[in-house]
Structures are given as structure tokens and as C-alpha cells.
Image (cartoon, grey):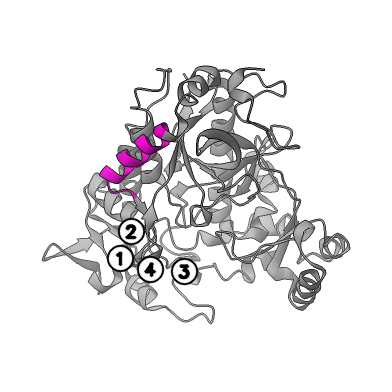
Amino acid sequence: MPTWTAPYETREGAFDEALLPDGAPRPGYGPLIEAITPEPAAALDEVARSLDERGVVFGSGESRQAFKVDPLPRLFEAGEWDRVEAGLIQRVRALNLFLEDAYRERRIVEAGIVPARVLDESILYEPIMRNGPSVPVAHVAGPDLIRDATGRFRVLEDNLRTPSGLTYAIAGREAVAGSPRLPALPVRGLEGAYDLLRDTIRSADPTGGGDPAMALLSDGPVATAWYEHRELADRLGIPLVTPGDLETGDRLTARADGAAIEIDVLYNRSSSESLRDRNGVLTPLGTLLAGPIESGRLACVNSFGTGIADDKAAYCYVEAMIRFYLDEIPLLESVPCLDLGEAEAFATAIERIDELVFKPRWEFGGHGIVFGPGATAAELRDLETRLNEAPADYVAQEPVSLSVHPTVAGDRLEPRRVDFRPFVYTRGDDVTVLPGGLSRFAGSTDELVVNSTQGGGAKDTWVLL
């Protein structure tokens, strides 16, 4: 066994992204690990200083913190990336076809593939988009991918509302790829990332003129991704506005830099993902946007209404959507999922309540999840009560052991659970995947959740040529 693996113990039952079962490095990893291990703490400090100099932070107010990036990048071999890319394109195409169908003919419901209640009961359904001037489009998708114990990639969530992380992925690349410690590997670049996003926003132009007035909508300094919002607006060359800057009439007007601008396309990065509240009443933002959207004078990226395809109940049927709309075999599988609104699925889930992972349909970011295998008897009783009261508000998934990746911890490498967020852009009929993305790692060897707010961080993700 190479000397640099001596203190490193991988997780039993978890796929190791960098090492083979015998401890030998996977292709490309040997030189990278050899470059980091002599001084891992120093390598981590160098990356942290680079990010600090750029002002890269996460969170807001008292929760604001430096964004953590590990100096050892994650690798995708070219052939492996090609397969992942093809699967992402296929999945996003099917999801956008589902959105069009859901707000128009509902053929998939008539065919008995997706239950009508998945649409009719969804709090993320937008009535004004039904037979409106345009159908909702998930222009920007950020599916979360994990790799199971067999090494197979699976989609954990589709993230079609306001996926975040692009600027953090690019900041990680700028901080890590330029390190003199690392050997030069043939890696696909991210240089065109902002041009691709700008073109994607422009493609939503409701005027058809090809040069729409665009703006990025944020909640302002209270937003956890405020750094990203400012960076995006600056790199895209578009105004950054908050709801307080908006006025409505026949057109949506935004006050930016002391001037009033009529907006054609609004890139929504606010926390408002619906135009109406749970009682069906227009929210303050909905009151501003509903009229221009209904008249066809305003488009939003991502479109309001995409949430019905991001509903966890809809997730249970994505592979069926691929077969129905594209007549293709799914290239990327979902984690096996049960829609508890179906009686048979509910009965199965209750019988296996201590074995499955239970998720509320409309929450995201890990909120409300109950891991059956790790829950106490009291927690399982409480869960069963809630499931019996509103079974259709939940789904159940098979637990998955996330893969691990060597990560700097003090003066050594330790395995950390990782996932991967790619970025998929839809411009008309064209679907493009950025060649890389944001790999996120957990904060400790025992932590199963990959989240920056729980001590985790990110890895630069290299797609080899």
C-alpha cells in the first residue's frame, strides 16, 4: 500500500472516489494526492487565503462564514463524464416536457402514469401558467447526484426552482487549479460558464427580439447566497434588484443605479419560488409579477411553476417520464422512491418505517427529513402519526450510502461523504451541461449530510479530457 494511504481508512460499504479497493489510486489521483500529502494543512491554508482575498463567503448576518474549499480536487474521467452528461441532458429534457404537459394537455395523467393529485394537490403549481402565453421552463437545473456503494451515479433531487452554487464552483476552480502544488492535468475549463448562463437568461426573451432587458432578483443582504447574487450580477453585466426596487403596470419596472428600467427577463434568485401562498393568495412579489407574466411581457428564469416538477412526489415518476416523453431507457436512475399518496406504497413504507428515509414533498435543503434507520422509537412513532394524518404529503426513499473522497483534515487526509451538483442549461431545444460543477463534502468522517452549514465544504471538480 502506498505510504500516503497509511493513515487513511475508507468507510466500509462506501465507494471511494479516489482509491480502488486495494488502496491503489484511481486514474489521475496518484499525482494529485502525492502533491498534497507532504503539507496538507499548508495546501488548505493557501486555498483559504485565495478565497478570502476574493471575498468568497457563505451565509448572511451572524451566520456568515468563509466558504471552505478542499485543495484536493475531485476527478471525472472523460468517458465517465460523457455518461453522466448524457443522463443529465436526457433527464432535464424529460422534466421540461413534463412541465409543458402539466400546464397544457396532461397526457401523462391521462395515460395513468402520474396520478392527477400529484399536480392538483401541489402547493408549487402556478394557476396563471395554465394555458398562459408560455409554459414554465426549468432554464437552469442543478440536480444533486450521489454515487452509491456499487459506484453507480443516482439522482437524489432535481432542483429546478432556484439552484445555486455556480459562483462557488468557479471560485473553487480559481483557488485550486492555479496552485503550484498540483500537477498540470488536461482538464476541461469553466471559462464559458457566465456566457452560457447569460445566453440562457437571454433565451427566455418574451419579445423575440434577442436583446431583452434583464435583471437578477435577490432578497438582498439577508440572503444566504448574497455573495453569489452580487457576483452573478456583476459577471453577467445585469442589474441586481430586490423586490423593493420593483414597480408594476403594463410592464415590470425596476429602479437600478438611479434609473427606471423596464424588465423583459427576471432571473429569480430570491427565496420566493411561488407567486401565491399556500392559501392561493398572491404574495407581495406575486402581485408585482403576475400581471406582466400573464400579459406575456415578462419572463422569469427559472419560470414560476417549475416547482411541480421539483415536487418530491413527481420525483418518484421521473424515470417513467423519460420513457413516456422520450421513449428512452433512463441513463441516470433515481434513488428508489415511494409516493405515499398511493395506498400500496404507503402500506410498504409503514411496514419498513425503520428502514427508509422519509421526506416532506415540498421541503428542500434537508429540512424535515427523517432517517428511519437512525431514528429513535419515539421519533418513529411521531413520524407514523404524521404519515397517517397526511400520507400524500410525504415520500419514502431507500437509504443510500454516499461515496467518500479523501479530504484534508488537519495534517492528514480523511474520507468525507460527497455529492455533486452539476449545472444544466436549457435554451430552447438546446440542453448544455457545464463541464464540472460543485462537489460538496461532509464536515466529519461520521457525518452523512453534505452541507456547508454543518461544517462541510466544497471541492473543485475536474473533468479530464
Name the disc covering residue 220, or none: 1
**Label 2–label 3 contact, CB within 8 A:** no
**Residue bearing the label numbered 4:** 294
Q: Secondary structure at mark 3?
A: loop
Magenta-highlighted stretch: main secondary structure? helix
For the residues marked 1 and 4, what is the alpha-carbon distance in whole angstroms?
26 Å
**Type of amino acid under label 1:** Gly
Between disc 1 and disc 2, whose residue precedes? Answer: 1
**Label 1–label 2 contact, CB within 8 A:** yes
The image shows residue 340, relative to residue 54, as above or below, that is below
For the residues marked 3 and 4, what is the alpha-carbon distance in whole angstroms?
15 Å
Between disc 2 and disc 3, whose residue precedes? Answer: 2
Q: How many marks?
A: 4
Query: Is residue 16 in view?
Result: yes
**Residue bearing the label numbered 3:** 274
**Type of amino acid under label 2:** Trp
> From which residue to which does the magenta span run?
42-56
Quadrant hosting residue 154: top right
Viewer-nearest of discs 3 and 4: 3
Question: What is the x, y in percent for residue 185?
Answer: 43, 18
**Residue bearing the label numbered 2:** 226
For the residues marked 2 and 3, what is the alpha-carbon distance in whole angstroms?
20 Å
Viewer-nearest of discs 1 and 4: 1
